[in-house]
Amino acid sequence: MQKDDHTISPLKKGILYMIQKFFRLFKSPLVLLLGMALFLGGCGGDVTAEETRIVMGTVARLTVRADEITSQAALRDGMAVLTAVEEDADGAVLARVEAAAGTGEWTEVPSGLYETLALAQEMARQSDGAFDITSGTLTELWDAARAAQYPPTAEEVAAARAHVDWHALELRERAADDGEHPEVRLLRAGMKIDRGALIKGLALDGIARSWAAGGAVNALADLGSSSILACGVNAEGEPWHIGIRNPRGESRSDLAAAAQLSDAMLSASGDDERYFLCEGRRYHHLVDPRTGYPAETGLASVTVILPQNAMEGTAWAGHEGQLSDMLSTAIFVMGAERGRSLLSEIPGAQLILIGTDGHVIE
């Protein structure tokens, strides 16, 4: 993390040093925040308030620039969204869907979950299956392999891959006297939904709605530095400055690119987050659902940036966090050329690709 420190008192410098030391205990981020204040007052009664918490398996940092009442309320509401997503109220419903897999039975689901699954299916269609929400068995297999530091056998991959197929996830809205009831079913026994593929995007969208309702117009949510919501401007009145880390850099502070964000969502996927090396080969967590193995497309990092209102007038409106999350995964699996075409029709979208040699792909 880099910071202009000429406006920070010695006490605040000491606090900053302790926080930086704390963060070094965690994994190297794909994206670094540049020039972010800790808790500083300013003119007009505005303050920059920040809260950091370990939630959803990552370090979440929320920063709000507003009057004290608004900023504290925004921090409270933002953390409440993260807690709700982590508690995973839909988990029990998805467990019932998975338990009924292969039986032909439909399971009624909440409308929000139905909408999320419908969007995931649309991304699967657009990416020709490079993003597949039904890849839960493959995710479990490679999580276990990473824990063992040894890749699964071809037979194990094939067995897990047999339970992955987005075409076998069906959704319908059943009409009844009291209205429509959203329902879901999995056509093959043993299929599982990869809930983790959506969780950060869902959180960003929830925080964006919360902050818009509460009047927090200048704020930033950083979820493990791979998912970021940037609203308005920073304390200097400028867009939020974001550094894109080099996944092949010698240190976690090595940057490959930079971006300036205002009213935008950022999602990054990279092969240096969760991986292991075996016999000279890197096995990372970004698995191609169509092959069952970690994707090998010459990419080490994919960063997708979308304006918050990029999808107005479409089914994706208000879900730009989920969209950017799905896109970064899909593009990593698809590769640079096809990935660019997937993003080409989204107004204001930006794409930063870093190859396995650590250089930005133009």
Image (tube, rainbow, N blue to C red):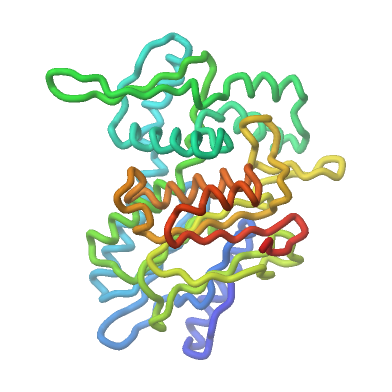
86 lies above or below 182: below
Q: Is residue 4 above or below residue 67?
A: below
Q: Residue at x 57, y 67 (%)?
A: 32
Q: Residue furthest top?
A: 103
Residue 308: x and y in percent read 37, 59
All told, the count of numbered labels is: 0
Residue 196 location (% of width, % of height):
50, 39
Q: What residue is drawn where x is 24% and y is 66%?
A: 215
- Locate residue 276 relative to residue 135 in the image: left or right: right
Quarter of the figure with residue 329:
top right
Q: Position of residue 105 (x, y in %)?
A: 37, 12
Which residue is located at x 44 percent, y 54 percent? 346
Quadrant containing the C terminus is: bottom right
In the displayed structure image, the side of residue 333 where residue 56 appears, left or right: left
- Residue 343 in percent (x, y) is at 51, 52
Q: Identify the residue at the far bottom of this view.
A: 6
As drawn, the residue found furthest toward the left would be 177
Q: Nearer the viewer, residue 201 or 39?
A: 201
The image shows residue 102, relative to residue 212, as above or below, that is above
> Relative to residue 235, is residue 214 drawn left or right?
left
Residue 236 visible in the shown view:
yes
Q: Nearer the viewer, residue 151 or 239?
A: 239
- Confirm whether residue 59 shows in the render: no
Q: Quadrant of the N terminus?
A: bottom right
Q: Residue at x 70, y 25 (%)?
A: 157
